[in-house]
Image (spheres, helix red, strand yellow):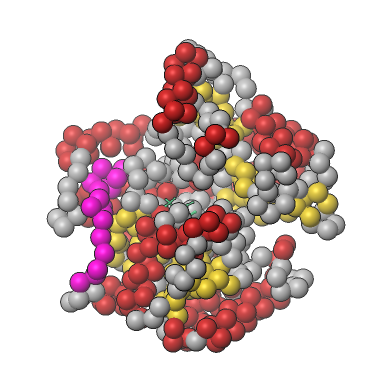
Amino acid sequence: PQPNPEQTPTPDPATGAAVKAADRAHVFHSWSAQDLIDPLAVAGAEGSYFWDYDGNRYLDFTSGLVFTNIGYQHPEVVAAIQEQAAKMTTFAPAFAVEARSEAARLIAERTPGDLDKIFFTNAGADAVEHATRMARLHTGRPKVLSAYRSYHGGTQQAVNLTGDPRRWPSDSGSAGVVHFWAPFLYRSRFYAETEEQECARALEHLETTIAFEGPGTIAAVILETIPGTAGIMIPPPGYLAGVREICDRHGIVFILDEVMAGFGRTGEWFAADLSGVVPDLMTFAKGVNSGYVPLGGVAISPEIADTFATRPYPGGLTYSGHPLACGAAVATLDVMAREGIVENAKHLGETVLGPTLATFAERHPSVGEVRGTGMFWALELVKDRETREPLVPYNASAATNAPMAAFAAAAKKNGLWPFINMNRTHVVPPCNITEPELKEGLAALDAALTTADEFT
Ligand code: PMP
């Protein structure tokens, strides 16, 4: 990748080497075999780009971990964080504080339906922990139903709920979690050939699971509105409304996890807005302040909030509603509205990203399916389009993951930082990416896919 003299400071390999050496000596990285990783030392970031100490610049098609919805270092949000730090950096949660109450008011204004009370957490996983605790206390029931092909976070309850291999090493086995299959037509568990069949059969399967588990034992059903990490699978029309109806009929709390899909990612403020379905509890994090300061939360319906009107809610966090994080959220939501960032995600998704990815599916034999909305897309890479055999096996080892590694290396060589999960690349750029930047990244992706094609 070519350095951009306007955006990239003078290369400084010596500092890069020192940063890297200290990292390797002392930083214990998430989800990693510590001796097998080689993290890039990052020197800086701005907008849709970041760069290393050698002067290589990358267009970020990952938005960090799908959280920098307004790009890196947005000057107004950086300034607001500095102002908030000067005014009130921190304060304990039991007090009414301007940044906190203003953030809660703005979030409640945006969230679907009557989700008007906000419990603040530090991130997504603890939002999931608290949402499920609220549901259990509200219903007095022990179990939560969660989908295979899901990700809900790395803390104990959240990882138990997660439906991917990251659960296996830490699964406590009896955490009151039951998994079921949510719809995914491309790899249907229901032998469905149409969206209608997939929807009807997935709803029937959920209904049956509830009947056999005992409806009176189930506190909640939790779903990502659009499963993100597991592959950006947009549910068929009618599915979420169907789950809503089933939950209502059995007195089950419906939790939508919008940690990844929320705050503009889908071209709507929330993915739930695409279907008009209103959950009882909704978790959020990431895009609420683009991850500039850690923040997450649960938006709560009046019925569930009432459960704790005169009886204490038994849970909390030292940094719940941290003023610096909330100040960043207020500024982020303001910038998103003023700059039309949600509209930008929708517009460029419909006019550039979706149509261009569709042409990749025509030209590249490795592209099995393209799916998504807004700035939230996945390419399913396959060995064979007929059999749909994935380009690498489920939960591949370093050895069997070689085709995806080669594809990622080709993208990076072209100045594009790709999001890779199993046999998929997710195209999840910042929601305020410009059209020329998006086209530049898509050209690099197009070229890198010829490397993936070699493994078909
Ligand atoms: N839920 C979903 C849908 C997520 O995508 C994530 C993070 N990728 C989480 C929960 C967990 O969030 P965090 O990593 O902030 O704890």
Q: Quadrant of residue 420?
A: top right
| Residue at image point 42% right, 48% down | 287
The kind of secondary structure the magenta stretch mainly shows is loop
Asked if the stretch drawn in magenta spans residue 291, the answer is: no
**Apparent side of residue 302 relative to residue 392 in the rendered image (left or right):** left
Image: 60 above or below 373:
above
| Residue at image point 48% right, 43% down | 30
Image: 153 above or below 432:
below
Q: Quadrant of residue 126?
A: bottom left
Asked if the stretch drawn in magenta spans residue 326, the answer is: yes
**Apparent side of residue 115 relative to residue 222 in the rendered image (left or right):** left
Which residue is more in the foreground, 429 or 127?
Answer: 127
Q: Across the whole image, how many numbered discs are drawn on residues?
A: 0
Image: 53 above or below 255:
above
**Apparent side of residue 263 relative to residue 120 in the rendered image (left or right):** right
**The C terminus is located in which quarter?**
top right
- Give percent across and percent down for residue 5: 52, 15
**Apparent side of residue 303 relative to residue 112 in the rendered image (left or right):** left
Residue 195 appearing in the image: yes
Residue 42 appearing in the image: no
| Residue at image point 62% right, 27% down | 415
Which residue is more in the foreground, 421 or 306?
Answer: 421
- Give percent across and percent down for residue 110: 37, 59
- Give percent across and percent down for residue 182: 60, 69
Find the magenta span and give its range.
312-328
Which residue is more in the foreground, 175 or 241?
Answer: 175
| Residue at image point 24% right, 70% down | 313
**The N terminus is located in which quarter?**
top right
